Amino acid sequence: MRHSSRSLVDPFIVMDVMEAARAAEDAGRHIIHMEVGQPGSGAPEAARARLAQEMEAGPLGYTVALGRPDLRAGIAALYGEWYYGVDLDPGRVVLTAGASGAFLLAFTALFDAGAKVALGEPCYPSYRQILTALSLEPVGLQTHAETRYQPVPDQLTDDLDGLIVASPANPTGTMLFEPEMRALAEACTAKDISLISDEIYHGLQYEGRAVSALEVTDDVYVINSFSKYFSMTGWRLGWMVVPPDHVRIIERLAQNMFICPPHAAQVAALGALQPEGRAELDRHRETYAKNRDILLKGLAEAGLTETAPADGAFYVYADVSTFTDDARAFSAEILDKAGVAVTPGLDFDKARGAGTLRFSYARSTADIEEGVARLIGFMAARKG
Amino acid sequence: MRHSSRSLVDPFIVMDVMEAARAAEDAGRHIIHMEVGQPGSGAPEAARARLAQEMEAGPLGYTVALGRPDLRAGIAALYGEWYYGVDLDPGRVVLTAGASGAFLLAFTALFDAGAKVALGEPCYPSYRQILTALSLEPVGLQTHAETRYQPVPDQLTDDLDGLIVASPANPTGTMLFEPEMRALAEACTAKDISLISDEIYHGLQYEGRAVSALEVTDDVYVINSFSKYFSMTGWRLGWMVVPPDHVRIIERLAQNMFICPPHAAQVAALGALQPEGRAELDRHRETYAKNRDILLKGLAEAGLTETAPADGAFYVYADVSTFTDDARAFSAEILDKAGVAVTPGLDFDKARGAGTLRFSYARSTADIEEGVARLIGFMAARKG
């Protein structure tokens, strides 16, 4: 059976790291996992309790395509809490099958086959692959340390149809602050470029306030999810905020492409939004904040000083090009000698990722402490 | 903000019926729902118990993209039970975000923008809309009562890239038996047409055995789901069986487009597959069988005798063109005068759906009995 050409997306190199880590564990070794981009914690107790109760009360049938109205209202209320001056109409909130489902809907709603969509590199690798799968053309914009590895208006050319920004970003953890976000939004409007703002790591910022694109424009698709701050990865629930005149377009697409987002996850999310759920989640954030300090200090001690500003998310992105020109081999060496799994930058940045590593600090503080000690020892031995 | 042209998919006309039914209920009327394509029952008790237990045991994080190996094995085992001579490798089973997610993956894996994909009409309306959203060209093949409203090999032209078949079908309930399925599969192979077999209603057949395309070829994408026989609509879990050399292609696409299917739904599905879950589901099927008999007899008594062979699923599709040339107005009249919500055929067949209605018998037997009595009274009054 033939397959399409758009199905030939790139493999994830991090999978090789995860496979090697698993093989090492199977062989009896103790591995510290700094390669994984998901919380070690699960859904809050309030989320699980809500689902346990509601699934016994009646069938969890299809919801309407845009998601349960009570959950859409709960999410809209978050914007009033998290951001200055955003009074969000719940009618603009669309529940989706993870942020992944939001990207599928957004790209389909905004772009026809052949459209060019820009993304700042390094970035979340699936942007590129989803664009390819939808017959769109990803256009990589090389970003630099001086601009916090974020794209800038000067990079936007007239031939672009779309721009994806992420703040806090994966893999760098860097944020776009208000002036930079505003400048990008204005440039997009001026050049008729559709702006998509990935805000999936909002709620996880440690210095400075995370800015939503909705603070500077309504002419944007904002994408978020219950996977990161809300610690509900496997539940596959995300959301979008779209311009008012796009709600109906998205509704029709969602009815056909998804029918509805997972109902059980919607119920659990309602629980997570309650005060006791939020309190549990805020404790996770405190853990990340502590882990981040330990990791940044430890990396510096290990001599890995060229790190991007770790504004948010749970990643530190390090330029290791003074130590290696093959990050994949370097990460294999770290796994082998130090027993620490880390991600080579190649998935995020094909051009320059051979000189970078991503360290995740989403796991327990004890793990981060142990990982840091091992990395310091490894780098000292390598130097010596 | 601009939107794409591929985002302009058709609205569902059934939504107007559902909205009118809700308005009538809000006004205090009692409505019998024969318009809805989902079971009135929920997930089996064994499914809910399994999830309640497992979600307290540890975080439901991301699973691997193709789904939990234990669930893939459980689904593969079903094929040995349900079909003759199908010994299915669990490695070919792919868990998906509903059958909807399976269609998105299948169409992306098989077809590039502009490809022509045929579907027998009447059919599930979202086939057409998902194809459009993915920049593919749906090609409707008019089917006829003499061939059980199923497409036949003679209709397959050389310019086609794909064919979607469904058995039991929505809206007709008709099945493709072994000779017809084999003939279509052979014609597809001869013409290099990629075959997709929608088997989402398998497990719900009442006369004759449902045939899987896997009984006649391995050169096929088979799509199924936990929504119908398994009564888990809102959980959004489906599956595909793909040719062995397509597993890797689907895996990469799924990693990027979905990350993984909903973990909670996967856990619940494992419970549903257990003997006590299956026993509960088989009781639902017995209810449908009883409902079907009542409905077929009642429609005949009402004078609605031109029905498609109701082999499976939970629908009866009736040609009402001797009574109306406007099924939408006719269904509004039935709702208004009889208090029964039914679906006009326009969503399923643009060309001829103005002369057809779909009756769903997925709800309780008491509802079907009451609905039938009302329909008989309505038709008698209309005639008289």
Image (spheres, coloured by chain):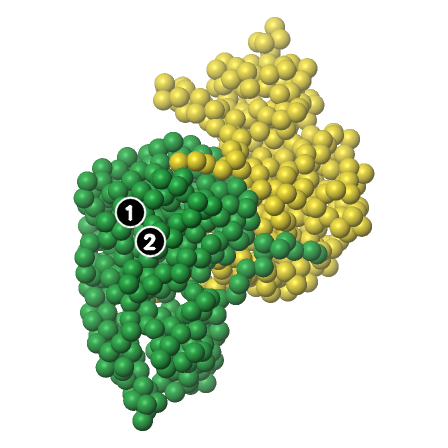
Chain colours: A green, B yellow
Q: Residue at x 23, y 49 (%)?
A: A178
| In front of the other: B219 or A296 | A296
Q: Position of residue B92 (x, y in %)?
A: 62, 62
Which of the two labelled residues, at mark 2 and mark 1, occupies the earlier sequence position?
2
**Element type where label 2 sits in the image:** loop
Q: Amino acid at mark 2?
A: Val
Quarter occupied by residue A70 = top left
**Element type where label 1 sits in the image:** helix
| In front of the other: A356 or A293 | A356
Badge 1: how crowded within 10 Å, few (<14), some, or many (20+)? some
| In front of the other: A117 or A131 | A117
Quarter occupied by residue B89 = bottom right
Instruction: Name the residue carrying label 1.
Output: A183
The CA span between labels 2 and 1 is 8 Å
Residue at the bottom extreme, as displayed: A384
Image check: B136 left or right of B194?
Answer: left
Image check: B259 left or right of A282?
Answer: right
Disc 2 to disc 1: CB gap under 8 Å = yes
Can residue A105 be seen here? The reply is no
Q: Residue at x 69, y 53 (%)?
A: B220
Q: Position of residue B191 (x, y in %)?
A: 78, 48
Badge 2: how crowded within 10 Å, few (<14), some, or many (20+)? some
Instruction: Name the residue carrying label 2.
Output: A152
Q: Position of residue A332 (x, y in %)?
A: 44, 81
Q: Residue at x 42, y 48 (%)?
A: A157
Check the image and report above or below for A151 versus A260.
Answer: below
Q: Amino acid at mark 1?
A: Ala
Q: Position of residue A162 (x, y in %)?
A: 43, 46
Check the image and report above or below for A83 versus A314.
Answer: above
Check the image and report above or below for A283 versus A117.
Answer: below
- Using the image, name the chain to which the residue with label 1 belongs: A
